[in-house]
Amino acid sequence: MRQAQAADWLPSTKFVRPVPTADAVIDAALLERVEHAALSMPATLIVAQAGAGKTTLAAAAVERLPVPVAWVTLDDLDDGPRALLDALVLALDRVVPGGCQLVRQVLEADVPAAQDARRAIGPLLNDVVASCDGLVVLVLDDLHSIHDPAALASVDYLLARMPDQLHVVATTRTEPAIGLPRIHGQGRLAEFTAERRRVDPISSAAVPCRRRWP
């Protein structure tokens, strides 16, 4: 009997980019800034409280990108190092030609990296480098669902070692407990933050950009 895999347990809807509703109103200038950030910056962070429209903004921005986009909507069941890694692999499987074969071999083998999700990020990134000629964008929607220190360490490791072929866009209600100051200091982070109030619909005043774009 075949052993159950992560793909058997996780609903495919986690990996589908939501389609903004017809009545969603997003400031055109803001949308253009987020789109530009996703293409030009290794990491883009959209921070706003529940109901502010983070997911809508991210979904609308990446819809317009001329590059493959991998999407994963995170929840509390992903709040662990191996569970998060499985979600990342399945998301990138959809856009990496041939799938993420190297990291799967590592996870199936009896080697130290198979027991350490942070170390297994390396083979995952190597899969992207080996198989993708151009840029791929990975969206981590609802990153605030991840609290486990080891899982957050994996996210930090991912952001610190991303190749030129991979950019990450994350939406979250609060800034994650990872090395954002370091990434920002390296000029690798664009951050969009909302005012402390509910905003419906999204407006450029609600989510000002901390970086000035040309």
Image (spheres, grey):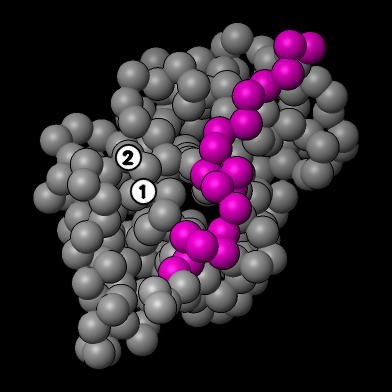
* Residue 171 left/right relative to 111: right
* Residue 7 falls inside the magenta stretch: yes
Q: Which residue is under mark 2?
A: 95
Q: CA distance from mark 1 to mark 2?
A: 5 Å
Q: Which residue is rendered at x = 12% and y = 50% of the image?
A: 130
Residue 105's spot in the image, x, y percent?
Answer: 22, 72
* Secondary structure at numbered mark 1: helix
Q: Which residues are magenta?
A: 5-23
Of residues 38 and 175, the one nearer the viewer is 38
Instruction: Tell me, yes or no, if residue 90 can be seen here.
Output: yes
* Residue 109 left/right relative to 80: left
Marks 1,2: beta carbons within 8 A: yes
Residue 200's spot in the image, x, y percent?
Answer: 84, 24
Q: Is residue 15 above or below residue 156?
A: above
Q: Which residue is under mark 1?
A: 92
Q: Which residue is rendered at x = 45% and y = 17% of the image?
A: 64
Instruction: Tell me, yes or no, if residue 57 can be seen here.
Output: no
Residue 116's spot in the image, x, y percent?
Answer: 36, 83
* Secondary structure at numbered mark 2: loop
* Residue 209 falls inside the magenta stretch: no
Q: Which residue is rendered at x = 57% and y = 28% of the image?
A: 59
* Residue 183 left/right relative to 32: left
Q: Is residue 10 above or below residue 31?
A: below
Q: Is residue 111 above or below residue 1?
A: below
Mark 2 closeness class: few <14, some 14–19, many ≥20 residues within 10 Å = many
Residue 207's spot in the image, x, y percent?
Answer: 68, 29
Instruction: Name which quarter of the figure residue 168 lies in.
Output: top left
- Type of the residue with mark 2: Val
